Image (cartoon, grey):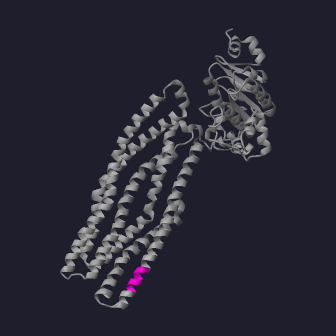
Amino acid sequence: MRSQGWRIVAGAGLGSAWMLGLALVPWVLNHVVDDGLVAGDPGALVGWSAGLLGMNVAIAVLAIARHRTMSKIRMDTSFRTVRAVVRHTAKLGSSLSRQVVAGEVVTIGIADVQLVSQSMTVTGPGVGAVLAYVAVAVVLFTISPMLAVVVLAGVPLLVVFIGPLLRRIGHTGADYRARQGQLTTRLVDVLSGLRVLNGLGGKEIAAERYGQQSRELVTRGYRVGGPASWVTALANGLPALFLAVVTWLAARMAAQGEITIGGLVAVYGYVAVLAIPVAFFIESAGDIASAVVSARRIVHLLALRPAHEDAEAAVEPPAGYGPLADPASGVVVRAGQLTALVSARPDEAIAVVERLGWFTETEATWAGVRVDTLAPHRLRERLLVADTDAELFSGTIRDTVAGRQEPDDDRVRAAVHTAVAEDIVDALPGGLDAPVAPGGSTLSGGQRQRLRLARAVYARPDVLLAVEPTSAVDANTEAVIVDRLRAARHGLTTLIVTTSPLVLDQADAVVFLDDGAVSGTHEQLLRDNQAYRALVSRVDA
């Protein structure tokens, strides 16, 4: 609301003018009947009827302007919330998955944002409903104080009827919302691992479990839908009940001569008009009750902080290209060299990379300075971790390779050449303008891997930590990639996690993790270390 204050004011103004215009129609209709029809005055009848026509035209114009303004308010709220969530999830980076499940983020995007934006309706017609209600009550006092008291008693009755329902919506809605996020997480997990499930024959089991949880969620949804449906029913039923009661009282008063026929028509019109603000009262209360549940989930996500956020203590990364050292494993990556990291346990090597890249708790250093004291954004600019699961977003090949940097066709082609990905560009219609599907789903595993490598090469970081960048390509392609990567990264620091002899033979240094870090060249380790020789030769020594 604060971010679009002027639009909120415009919506409240238009909503109030629209509601008050509706409330004035019975007053004009009263004069049409009493001053024109009952009095038999054609001039007054035509004049007041023309005024009634003009008022309805103005109300229609106000209704259009109000609806357009409120639509903009809701859309702005929706897009602004999505933008805040996306920006914050990007800021959380690798710590996001440790603090919140994927389904929670997805549910926020497809459900919570909509509920929060819908609640903004209260700022327009909601404000107008209050003013219209007060205006009708004041006018009714001039006709009959008793009728005005009956109308004003409606608000306390609304609180009595819908208050417990709103509290139940808030309680059951929070539980439903939490389980909805859990179910969405399971769906994301199933879809992301569908190929594996097909291969293992576990698709039916996963589908059965998902179906069971989905049915349980439906049952809980009924618990939320019950009170919510009563709120909707009361939004229509209570105004009709008021209309019947007040019309009955007004008809008796007109029969007894206490009010005029025009007054009876006006009272009926006033109460009929009140059906609109009363409905807005009830619906807005229901919308806010649901939106509060969703807003709490969004605020919870926005309150999460990166695991290594410490802006005040952050310093600039040291000049130069290293060396990098990981005290936990004893690994040292020399500056300006191509270093290979080898381990019989892949998780062990990946853990070293995560510590060097500060994706987990670490005591690793860059030129003697602990990386967890460096400014995160500056560290990410100069040190890049390229793993096999790096996301490929939808866009063109040019944009995919350029990543967050401005695309330059010459540099893009050079990076594609280094990654031996020219065949991808040549095979797709449009060349560099060819589209890449989300996640690179239309590409093979080897093609996705080469595009990821091309993106890492294009970024040209001072330090590149690459995890198995050639594991999905054939031996001939791998040999060419290593040769070109070595040339493209000359003078820069590069660490490659691999067990491929083709890569190891090209490395300046090899670090072998075997109850500690053992360093040397590929030839030296083959000659002197039996465990290394057994691992990279794929035979028992």
Q: Where does residue 13 sit, x and y in percent of width and height?
A: 47, 70
**218 to 129, vertically: above or below:** above
Q: Where does residue 459 sit, x and y in percent of width and height?
A: 73, 40
The answer to which of 324 and 128 lies nearer the viewer is 128
Q: Residue furthest left?
A: 256
Left or right: 426, with 41 as reference point = right
At x 29%, y 89%, the residue is 39
Magenta includes 50? yes
In the picture, the quarter occupied by the C terminus is: top right
- Label total for image: 0
**475 to 189, vertically: above or below:** above
Left or right: 56, with 414 as reference point = left
Can you see residue 527? yes
The answer to which of 216 and 118 lies nearer the viewer is 216
**139 to 533, vertically: above or below:** below
Left or right: 518, with 304 as reference point = right
Can you see residue 369? no
Q: Where does residue 259 sit, x and y in percent of width and height?
A: 24, 81
At x 62%, y 31%, the residue is 362
Tell me which corner region of the image, top left, top right, bottom left or bottom right, holds residue 90.
top right
Tell me which corner region of the image, top left, top right, bottom left or bottom right, holds residue 316.
top right
The kind of secondary structure the magenta stretch mainly shows is helix
Q: Where does residue 299 sit, x and y in percent of width and height?
A: 48, 48
Magenta includes 446? no
Left or right: 212, with 429 as reference point = left
Tell me which corner region of the image, top left, top right, bottom left or bottom right, holds residue 465.
top right
The part of the chain drawn in magenta is 47-53
The answer to which of 373 and 39 lies nearer the viewer is 39
